[in-house]
Image (cartoon, grey):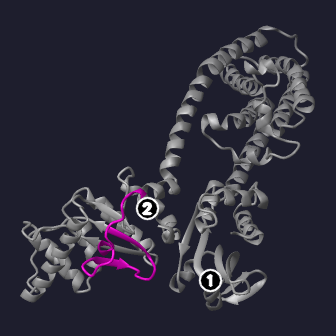
Amino acid sequence: MFTPKDVQNILSYLQNINSNVKINTSELNERLKSHSSYPSLLSIVDVISDLGFKSTGYELNSSNFESLPHLFLAQVKNSEYGTNEMVLVKKEHNLLFFDSEQINSEEFLQLSTGVFILVELKNTTLRNNFILCGVILLLGVSLFLYDFTFFSYFILLSLPLIGLFMSFYFFESLFNIRIDILNKICYKNEISNCKTISSSKKWKVFNYINFSDLGLVFFFTQILTFLCLFLNVTLGFIVEIYLMCGFVIIPILALSIFYQLFVEKKWCRICLLIALNLVIQLVVAFYLYSFLGYPDFKYYPFITFSIIYVIVFTLWSPLLKKTLQKNQKLTGQNEYLNDIVNDYDTFKAILLLNKQKDKNICNNEYLFSFGSNDDALNITVITDPFCKYCKSTNKMIRTILENYSQNLNINFLFNVDLADKNINYYRLITYSYLMNKKESFFDFICNKHNTDIINDNINFSDLVKIDEFLLNQSKLCDNNEISYFPTILIKGYEYPLKYDIKMLENFIPQLILDKNNL
C-alpha cells in the first residue's frame, strides 16, 4: 500500500506540473484506494490520468536514464523497512535531489527499481493572453484618441461580449468547451460554488427558466441588436436601449444576490462578475446619456430590443437548448461506452477469459525474436508479409518495439506451407534473420516486396535450416489452432477479437506495469 508520504509526493508532482490542481492528499488517497488495481503502480497512472493529465509509467534501465525530464516520480527501495516507495525526483545534470538528499545518477540507479512515472507538460498560453489583452487595450485607447463616438461604440460592444463570454461558463458541458480562466475564478470551496447556484431549483420558477438562460440570451441579444442597428441609428438610440435595459435588470440582479445570500447561502463568483458587468453598462449608458445632453426618452428602442429578446429566447430555450441537451446525452453515452472500451481493467478481464496458449509458442528457438529477454512482457505476433490486413499491424508493432524495446520481448512467426508459391520470399526473410540481419526483418514484412527475389548465397545446408525453422513455426500454429492473420498473443493469451488491434498501443504501458499479474 502507499504511505502518506507516497501520496504527498504524487500530489506535489502534480502541483509542480499544474499549480491549480484542486485536490488534497486525503481525496487523492481515497481515489488510489478505490482503484481496482490498488496498490499497483497502474493505479497511480490511472488516477493521474483521471485528473486530466497525460500520464505514463515506464520501466527504464541506465541506458535510457538521460532521457528522463528534470522532474519525475520514481520508485526506490527503502532498505530500512524493506519496502518500495514513491519519491519526487528533480534532476540537474548528473545530480538528483529527493527527500532532502543529493546523489549522483549512479547511486540513484542502485536505489531505483527502474520504474518511473511521467506526466506530460502542457504548453502555457499566458504570453499569448497578455498579447491579446494588450492589443485590445491599444485598440480602445486609439479609438478614444481618434473619435469619442467610435470609442463609445467600442465600449458598448465590448461589455456584452465580456458578459456573453462569462455566461458560457454555465454551459460548458452543453457546448463541449472548457474555459480555464473562468474555472480558476470559480473554484469550489465552502462559501462558493458556481455550478450549484446555476443548477439550483429551490424556487419552482427555476423549473422553467433560470438565471443562466436569462444572462446568455440577454448578452447575445445585446450584441445582435448592436450589430444590426449601429450603422443605421444614432448613438443615442443604442444608449437608450442600454439605459432602459439596465433599469429593468436591476430587480433581477437584486433577486440573484438575495437567492445566493439567503437561499443557497453560497456565492457564485461568475454571477457577481456578470452583475458587475451589467452595473458598469448602466453607469456607462448613463454617462453617455448625460454626454448627449439628456435627450427625450423614446420607447421604441426598448420595444425593438424586447422583440428581439423574445425571439432569441424562444429559439434558445425550447428549441436549440433542448437539441444540444439531446446531443449531449448521446455524446455522454458514447463517451461512457468509449470509457469501457478504453478501460484497462475491462480489457485485461476480457483478455484473461481466453485460454492461454502453449508456452512454446511464446518462448521457442524457432521464433523471430526482438527486444529484451530479461523479465520482459512477452508479445507473440503471427503474421504474413502477403496479408494486406497485416501491414498496419506490422508497422504498429515496429513502433511499439522502438518505444519499449527494454520492456518487451516481441516474437514473430509465419504459418506458411513449404509448397507455397512465395516460399522463396519467406526463406529470404528467415535467412536474413538467421544471419543476424534483424533490422531488415521489418522492411520485408512492412514494405512492398519483390516475390521473385532469390538469394544466391543460400546454400543447401542453409536451406535445410531455413525450412526447418519455417516448418516448426507452422507446427506451433497448428498445435495452438491458429489459422488467421494477424493474431497477437499477450503472454499466451489471444488478443480479444472485440478490440481493434490499433488499441494495443494504448494499453502497452499498463500491460508492462501489470505483466506479473497476467
Which one is closest to the eye, mark 1 or mark 2?
Answer: 1
Q: On residue 505, which mark appears?
A: 2
| Residue 302 or residue 329, whichever sits in front | 329
In this picture, which residue range is highlighted in magenta? 353-380
- State the CA–CA distance, disc 1 to disc 2: 26 Å
The answer to which image quadrant residue 76 occupies is: bottom right
> In screen coordinates, is 80 left or right of 436?
right
The stretch drawn in magenta includes residue 358: yes
Which residue appears at 18% of the width and 79% of the height? 469
> Mark 2 packing: few (<14 Cα in 10 Å), some, or many (20+)?
few
Report whether 101 appears left or right of 266.
left
Disc 2 on helix, strand or loop?
Answer: helix
- Please name the residue shown 6% across and 68% down the image: 419
Seen in the image, is 73 located left or right of residue 137?
Answer: left
Q: Residue at x 31, y 67 (%)?
A: 381
User: Is residue 142 in the magenta section?
Assistant: no
Q: Is residue 385 above or below residue 246?
A: below
Contact flag, marks 1 and 2 (Cβ < 8 Å): no
Query: Residue 275: image x %, image y %?
Result: 85, 31
Q: Which residue lies under the disc numbered 1?
A: 112
Quadrant, the N terminus? bottom right
**Does 188 sit above or below residue 238?**
below
Q: Quadrant of residue 168?
A: top right
Of callouts 1 and 2, the N-terminal one: 1
Residue 489 sits in quarter: bottom left
The picture places residue 418, in percent across and down from the top left corner, at: 9, 71
